Image (cartoon, rainbow, N blue to C red):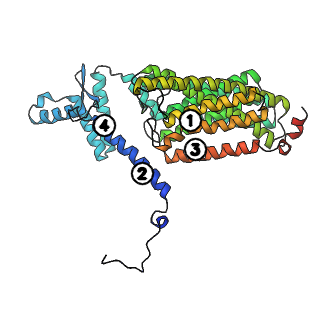
Amino acid sequence: AAFYDPGLEMPSEAEFNPDPEGTKQKLVELRAKIERVTGISELMKKPDAGGNTMEPPLAVPEGKESWQTYTDENLKLFLSRTFEKDKVNPAAEKLHAILTAYKKKDAPAFNTAVADYRTYLVANPPKEYDAQRRDLEAYLNHVDPFFYLTFFYVLTFVIVAIGWLAKPEFFNGMAFRMICFTFALQSAALILRMYVSERPPVINLYSSAVFIGWGAVLLGIIFEAIYTIGIGNIVASVAGFGSLLIAFLLSRQGDTIEALEAVLDTQFWLTTHVVCVTLGYATTYVAGLLGSIYILQGVVTKSLNPTIGKELARMTYGTLCFALFFSFVGTVLGGLWADDSWGRFWGWDPKENGALIIVLWNALVLHARWDGIAKDRGLAILAVAGNITTSWSWFGVNQLGVGLHSYGFSQELLNVLFWFVAGTAAIVALGSLPTTLWRSAEKLRAT
């Protein structure tokens, strides 16, 4: 009160905090990091009567038959160095050297300590230690094959584009062979990840992006093998590039071979529910991509004729049938998993609602087609809009920071999601223009 000046104006809320939304997002990120640090801290403690029931990881081998917690072994290491130097656990000592070098940010000492620890483990392999699998994991993290495969998909799209100018059959054939080769490489890398993690193909957001791309590319190859008109090559190259680009952005958040945040005490639900839901994402995205091709080809070019339009509509319809099947079965399996893990089948969690929205949207589109409400153009528009619902379920609900499935928050991904939704909405708007404004209007009227 002594320093109060009635003539002094207090700053407005906007002046005091010029970016309130940015502050909220940073607070959500901070909360996620605090929760992760707290979880790791709890895991390093032994269970006690005070409510700490988390099982600490058995991270340090003691001989060849047993593993112990780092807390226990670190205490034993201190006591052994002080009183019984002949009983020092070499594994604990070498692991302590690694952590000490890391704390001091001494890279040469860290690398030397890691190499020394690895040599010891190879010479004295503890129970359940697999040196080959660990070396392969390090190799995959170092090489990052999925990042380089994005360039193959870009090259394939360039080859397809050249075919639009001259010799379409020749360049489409070349692009198809290139897609098959790239798909084989992606499949091999995916199998190696499964071997390393000893899990099904989808264990986190990063692997979901990789698997969605894999499924979309497979559909593109099937389309091109059946129709041989270049559409499958476009689907495969665009979907492959887009999904692996998302995977690259996700890889920058840390380790890519890690467990989901949800309950992962069984391989069964990972193999059934997660794979089914992810295939539902992939097929819905492919249907939306086919709808985008229909709209852009009709609006921007003069090449959309009745034959190509019918083929695109047929592909979109068939893909949506698979999308409804996988999304519905995956959602039901997710409810069963929830009942098994949390004791309730459905809890209106944002992620659960997002999965249900995909099922309802795909059902809506198919019913509109069956009832004749949506013709070829309407089917394309609705399929494109389905990509927005899928993106919301895949990434959008994670940005809310609430619910049992809230994970993977990232400002960078939020920006990507915003621009993807904006671009998708723009395509929907283009498709909604009267066909008289389309450049392919004359050919479409010739039906």
Mark earlier in primary sequence (2, 1): 2
The span from disc 2 to disc 3 (Cα, nearest Å) is 20 Å
Sequence-first tag of 2 and 3 = 2
**Badge 2 is on which residue?**
27
- Give the labeled residue for mark 3: 417
Q: Amino acid at mark 4?
A: Thr
Q: CA distance from mark 1 to mark 4?
A: 29 Å
What is the residue that sits farthest to the left in this orientation?
A: 83
The nearer-to-camera label among 1 and 3 is 3
- Residue in view at x 13 percent, y 32 percent: 80
Q: Which residue is mark 4?
A: 112
Mark 2 and mark 4: Cα distance apart in space:
38 Å
Marked residue nearer the N-terminal end (1 or 3): 1
Q: Quadrant of residue 119?
A: top left
Sort mark 4 into few (<14), some (14-19) or many (20+) by Cα contacts within 10 Å.
Answer: some
Residue that carries the numbered disc 1 in the rendered image: 148
Q: Are marks 1 and 3 in contact (CB under 8 Å)?
A: no
